[in-house]
Image (cartoon, rainbow, N blue to C red):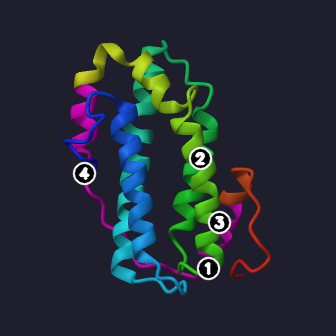
Amino acid sequence: MVPADSEGNGSITGILVDDHRRLEQLLESAVDSEGHVEPDSYNHFRAGLLRHIGIEEKILLPAAQRQRGGEPLPIASKLRLDHGAIAALLMPTPTSSVLAMLRSILEKHNLLEEGPEGLYPTCDTVLQEEMDRLLVQLRAAPNLAVIPCSDAPAVLGAVRRAVGRAGFELSDDFPR
């Protein structure tokens, strides 16, 4: 859940950067030093990350596009491709190669959102007029349930396609 009392509670950047750090901690706590994944903790991370993506896809990007007279933010298409790859990587069993790819994409993706010209600072500027309403929406975004992980061939194929569309390359040890 996006913390209601975060230090940056008066800005989109503050709230969502805090949520990035929370999600990073959830992922780290779900995987022990030997790489074993605790399923309940990992599912909590998955649900939180999908909620976070939903906030960006259903609240921020559409609000910024409306505010810009229907013109999407220049960064929007890349973010959407990344979101597709990230969500796809949450579907299979979290092997070491899946987790490595997920971490790699998240590291690059978070920079696109948090950086000086990133999504969050841009939205803080572009959406200033509706900030109070948007902050309420961010905090009220619903928690999500996740389905069990699956290594079905169709799932793994979808992961490969989504990661490739986003411009990333899976390692050779990614499950086939």
Across and down, in percent, residue 162 comes to: 65, 58
> Where does the image place residue 20, in percent across and percent down from the top left?
43, 50
The quadrant where residue 135 appears: top left
For mark 2, what is the residue? Answer: 109
**Residue segment shown in magenta:** 133-161
Q: Earlier in the sequence, mark 1 or mark 2?
A: 1
144 relative to 20, above or below: below
To which residue does mark 4 refer? 142
- Residue at (59% x, 47% y) in the render: 109
Q: Earlier in the sequence, mark 2 or mark 3?
A: 3
Q: Earlier in the sequence, mark 4 or mark 3?
A: 3
Asked if one can make out residue 48 in the rendered structure from this viewpoint, the answer is yes
The numbered dot on residue 110 is none
- Disc 4 residue crowd, few under 14, some 14–19, many 20+, Cα 10 Å: some
Q: Nearer the viewer, residue 91 or 101?
A: 101
Q: From the top left corner, tell me how far across and down residue 153 is, in percent.
A: 64, 80
Instruction: Read off the residue under disc 3.
Output: 101
In reply to whether residue 154 is colored magenta, the answer given is yes
Q: Which residue is mark 1?
A: 96
Nearer-N-terminus badge (1/3)? 1
Distance from the alpha carbon under mark 4 to that under mark 3: 27 Å
- Of residue 161 and residue 135, the one placed in the foreground of this image is 135
Is residue 83 a member of the stretch shown in magenta? no
User: Taking 43 as reference, is 104 left or right?
Assistant: right
Residue that appears at 51% across and 71% down: 91
The image quarter in which residue 156 lies: bottom right
Give the residue type at disc 2. His
